[in-house]
Image (spheres, grey):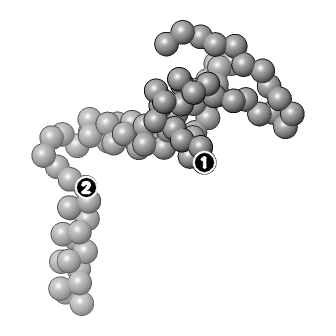
Amino acid sequence: MEEVRARVSEGGRVSLPAAYRRALGVNIGDDVILRLEEGEVRIFTLRHAIENAQALVRQYLGEGRSLSEELLAERREAAAHE
């Protein structure tokens, strides 16, 4: 996607162009995450942040493992012993 120029308005507001909102799947009222990296601002959705976190964890777990299923199994076992 090409770069666009935006103006910072009162209160430090910057509007995202409609094409960018569509590309990100962002709607009015949605939360986004801003990250400052090396003098640049990155904007991404919560969904994208969760997908990135899942991908990071997955590389250490390997395929076929589910931490949530393992946690549930541990809780069930602990409850059975109470």
In this rendering, position of residue 15 left or right of residue 80: right
Q: Residue furthest bottom?
A: 82
Q: Residue furthest top?
A: 2
Residue 79, compared with residue 54, is above or below; it is below
Residue placed under numbered mark 1 in the picture: 29
Q: Which residue is painted at 24% across and 90% down in the image? A: 82
Q: Residue furthest right?
A: 10
Q: Which residue is painted at 49% across and 13% down in the image? A: 1
Query: Residue 35 at what x, y percent from top left?
Result: 61, 32
Query: Residue 62 at what x, y percent from top left?
Result: 18, 40
Residue 20, compared with residue 69, is above or below; it is above
Q: Residues within 10 Å of mark 2 (few under 14, many from 20)?
A: few
Total numbered badges shown on the rendered structure: 2
Amino acid type of the residue tagged 1 in the rendering: Gly
In this rendering, position of residue 77 left or right of residue 1: left
Residue placed under numbered mark 2 in the picture: 67
Secondary element type, mark 2: helix
Amino acid type of the residue tagged 2 in the rendering: Leu
Q: From the viewer's perspective, is the residue at label 2 or at label 1 nearer?
A: 1
In this rendering, position of residue 46 left or right of residue 60: right
